Amino acid sequence: MTLSPRIVRAAFSAALALLGLAAAIGGWGYGVAQENGQIGAGFLPVALGTIIAVLAGVDTASILLRREPAHPAEQLTGVEAEADAAAIDTVEESPDIDALGRTQRQRNRMLVVVGGMLLGALLLVPVLGLLISLGVLMLTIAIVVERRPIISSIIVSVVAVGIVHLIFGVLLNVPLPTGLIGLI
Amino acid sequence: MLDNLILGFQTALTLENVLWCAVGVVLGTVIGLLPGLGSTTGVAVLLPLTFVMEPVTALIMLAGIYYGAQYGGTITSVLISTPGEAASVVTTLDGYQMAKRGRAGAALAISAIGSFIAAIISLALLMALAPPLASIALEFQPVEMFAIMILGLVIVVTFQGGALVRGGLMAALGLLVATVGIFPGTGGTQRFTFDNVNLLSGIPFVEVMIGIFALGEVLYQIRVGAAKPIRARFKDMVIKRKDITDSMPAILRGSGIGFLLGMLPGAGSTLASFMSYGIERRVSKNKANFGKGAIEGVASPESANNAAANANFVPTLALGIPGGATTAVLLGAFTIFGIQPGPQLFETQPELVWGLLVSFFIGNVLLLVLNLPLAPVFAQMLRIPYGYLYPIILLTSLVGAYSVGNNMFSVWLVLIFGVLGYLMKELDLPLAPFVLGLVLGPLFEKALVQTSAIGQGDLGVVFQSPIAVGVLLLALVMVLLPRLVGLARGALRRRKEQALVG
């Protein structure tokens, strides 16, 4: 089951409305005004939280009440529509398939995989260190996700990590975390 | 003025500054042309590298990235119809059509020439207008500054191209994120820190920018997918004299429009390029060819976005209010270097300000020299598979973020704001109001606290200042004008339709 973009957008706006409410309530606890009548620490959070809650609420309602257009191009006019048409023109065969022949479904899967790998790499930093974790991430993305040749992927990853180590670790003296293995 | 210019040349023409200016413009061109990277991303990611430099050198290099990216963004617009910069979106219309007809070189050359002319005109205007504006702004009290910041936010919300509600929502969200940390008024209350010491000084700006513009863009590009480039060859670079003479009125008009719009706090280069293209399409002798490969359709928006990029520095330097997203990041860089941007800058740091302004001249000369013959060479960068490119962007962004505070907290922040940035792009929520809100947040609250103190708790004191009232009225006009124009157009259209039916 896939959620329609309209529902995702409405859900995001609704989440922002809740965030606004939470900020306003939290801000109230800091005090909206001081004893001398001047604004307190909570004034701006309350004001902004309320504005966010109202605007996000309006946005959510307008998304849910709006009729979904038959084609996205209906929403565009003038120069914007022409720019959009020019962009679509680059994908001559099908708007769903990119220049590398990947479908939208494949690209969505890639996005989830890369996001997961990124999270995994950051969780591995205390063990492998920052540079090695990110180097492994680079290599894995290049080989597994992007299906690039193994040798060139290794060369690109090693050279990139080497240059970054040289710039940040050696030239700028940034104490990069080396993790349990303590290499670089 | 002459003394200041001499001081500027003395500062900018040191070997070190010229070298870093050249590095900045070359990096900017490369960053601008690579899909998924823009000037804001480039400045945010490379900012940590400049911490070891002198402030003036660092700012010269970062500014070089900014206007270099304007040139680079054009290359992708013309060759793959994928703008490297939002300001180059409109260039895709005629630029890509020219490329498909084998005139990619002419499109890139006129863009470089137009951008150069616009840059020189706008720099002369910037140098003439920013100092007097700063002198006037020196008289401003917190009340007036508070009103000007509201105007800046209103302009960016109004002109960002989407619905007013969503623009306002994003600006408010940016301001709210900026409230995290210690309250700037009396008492020093901690807000939304959740007992995390890393949040005491607020959510760090550089990490947020890297998250939104680097990681967020990478995730978005993965979902959007790759486009097929058109190759640019050296022999195609030849531009005819007629092309230049035909384009000159468009270049001059674009420069003027770009400068006027770029000078407004909060209005960016993107708006300037769209407006300029729209006007050119109405007034040009060649209007029938617009959208089919008209060279004026490339010259006009490219001149406008370059002029606007320079004009963005008028409010940034004179008022301390950024003109757009990238100047907002640059404004953050000023504060990281311990420099308070604003009207005092011209008096307290003349060497820095005039050195920076003169470096724009040097940078634009370098860009013209580089871009006219070397655009096809730069274009070869487009052949680097994105599958190699984005892991490198992830590596440099995350290590760069770590180096800002030397802790993993920065890296996790990048991840959080990267996801937020991706969602904002995916859901078509405007980024510029969020960034401006985030940058202006601390200044805005400080002005609010001071205004409250002046009025002894009564914020109505704002309405006792004629300047503040004028500025707030202007903000109101900015909000209402597009709606009133829309209503008037609708009424006119309905009347025409009724007349036709009748």
Image (cartoon, coloured by chain):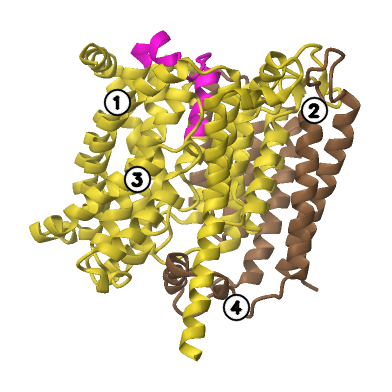
Q: Is there any visible trace of residue B225 in the rendered image? A: no
Q: Which mark is residue B258?
A: 3
Of tags 1 and 2, which is closer to the observer? 2
Location of mark 1 (residue): B127
Residue type, numbered disc 4: His
* Mark 4 residue crowding within 10 angstroms, few (<14) / some (14–19) / many (20+): few
C-alpha span from label 4 to label 3 = 33 Å
From the rendered image, report the letter of the chain displayed in brown.
A
C-alpha span from label 3 to label 2 = 38 Å
Location of mark 4 (residue): A71
Tell which subunit mark 2 falls on: A
Q: Residue furthest bottom?
A: B502
Tell which subunit mark 1 falls on: B
* Mark 1 residue crowding within 10 angstroms, few (<14) / some (14–19) / many (20+): some
Of tags 4 and 2, which is closer to the observer? 2
Q: Position of residue B269 (x, y in %)?
A: 42, 45
Q: Which mark is residue A43?
A: 2
Q: Position of residue B146 (x, y in %)?
A: 60, 26
Residue type, numbered disc 3: Gly
Position of the C terminus of chain A, as image quadrant, is top right
C-alpha span from label 1 to label 2 = 39 Å
Q: Residue at x 28, y 26 (%)?
A: B128
Q: Is residue B199 magenta?
A: no
Of tags 4 and 3, which is closer to the observer? 3
Q: Do callouts 4 and 3 mark residues in contact (Cβ within 8 Å)?
A: no
Q: What is the drawing colour of chain B?
A: yellow
Q: What span is colored magenta in the figure?
A: B327-352
Instruction: Residue B399: name its quadrant.
Output: top right
Q: Residue furthest left?
A: B241
The reply to the same-chain question for discs 1 and 3 is yes
Precedes in sequence: disc 4 or disc 2: 2
